[in-house]
């Protein structure tokens, strides 16, 4: 049987969230408990453990980051709200992380970090979120959803930065995960009519 890895958080006695991961039930802390930190996604390649997450500043803004084997790497500078949601490491060791930023505090914009370099994902609505990423060959697939106004959300994904909408209209839909097999794209999520 293989090893089981899980990423998440655990609160300390002072109510501070500590990012952690578990390997076969054994916990490993990723932060010192001075600030709220969150582990959102985990990817294991060989002996290397990659975890995407974020940390809150003292002024409650957040900055995106990831850990490789427990070493913290920043993705943003803390001047905006930045949240990571998913991480994927390619066979060539390229690190893909997706999430979103609040560049103007009001509405979020979906972003991709590849090897710590940020790219804003295209969208034409009021706000956009990226929730999961997977790489198949040279193609990068990112699950996400847009806020289109009037409390309505539309599920979609990007293939190499090109939007593919799964639903448009007055019904709400969100994506939470993505997988690609033999060219077929599979997405998980929620739909509310």
Image (tube, rainbow, N blue to C red):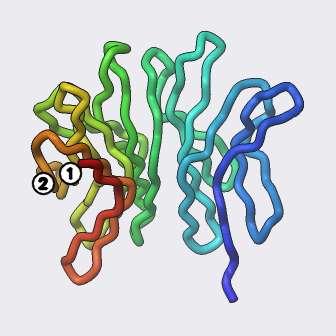
Instruction: State left or right for residue 22 relative to residue 179.
Output: right
Q: Circle 1 sits in a helix, a strand or a loop, which is it? A: strand
Check the image and report above or below for 133 versus 139: above
Q: How dense is the environment of label 1, judged by Cα within 10 Å: few (below 14), some, or many (20 and up)?
A: many
Side of 171 where 88 appears, left or right: right
Q: Residue at x 51, y 20 (%)?
A: 78
Q: Residues within 10 Å of mark 2 (few under 14, many from 20)?
A: few
Count of numbered circles on the image: 2
Question: Residue 76: x and y, percent?
Answer: 46, 28
Asked if the residue at tag 2 contacts the one at tag 1, i.e. Cβ–Cβ closer than 8 Å, the answer is yes
Q: In terms of sequence position, does the residue under pointer 1 or pointer 2 come before the other?
A: 1
Q: Residue 164 has which mark? A: 2
Residue at disc 2, secondary structure: strand
What is the CA distance from the residue labelled 1 to the residue labelled 2? Answer: 6 Å
Query: In the rendering, at what x and y percent does residue 162 appear?
Result: 12, 51
Give the residue at x 46% y 15%. Answer: 79
Residue furthest right in the image: 13
Identify residue for label 1.
156
Residue in the image at 17% along x and 31% along y: 148
């Amino acid at each position: 049987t293989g090893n089981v890895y899980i990423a998440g958080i655990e609160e300390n006695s002072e109510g501070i969230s500590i990012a952690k991961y578990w390997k076969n039930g054994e916990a490993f802390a990723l932060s010192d408990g001075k600030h709220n930190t969150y582990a959102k996604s985990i990817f294991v390649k060989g002996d290397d453990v990659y975890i995407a997450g974020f940390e809150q500043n003292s002024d409650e803004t957040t900055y995106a980051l990831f850990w490789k084997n427990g070493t913290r790497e920043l993705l943003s500078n803390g001047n905006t709200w930045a949240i990571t949601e998913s991480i994927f490491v390619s066979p060539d060791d390229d690190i893909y992380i997706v999430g979103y930023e609040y560049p103007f505090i009001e509405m979020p914009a979906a972003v991709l970090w590849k090897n710590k370099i940020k790219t804003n994902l295209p969208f034409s609505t009021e706000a956009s979120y990226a929730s999961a990423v997977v790489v198949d060959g040279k193609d990068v697939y990112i699950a996400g959803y847009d806020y289109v106004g009037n409390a309505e959300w539309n599920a979609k994904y990007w293939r190499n930065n090109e939007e593919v909408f799964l639903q448009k209209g007055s019904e709400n839909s969100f994506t939470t995960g993505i997988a690609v097999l033999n060219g077929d794209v599979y997405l998980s999520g929620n739909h509310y009519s």
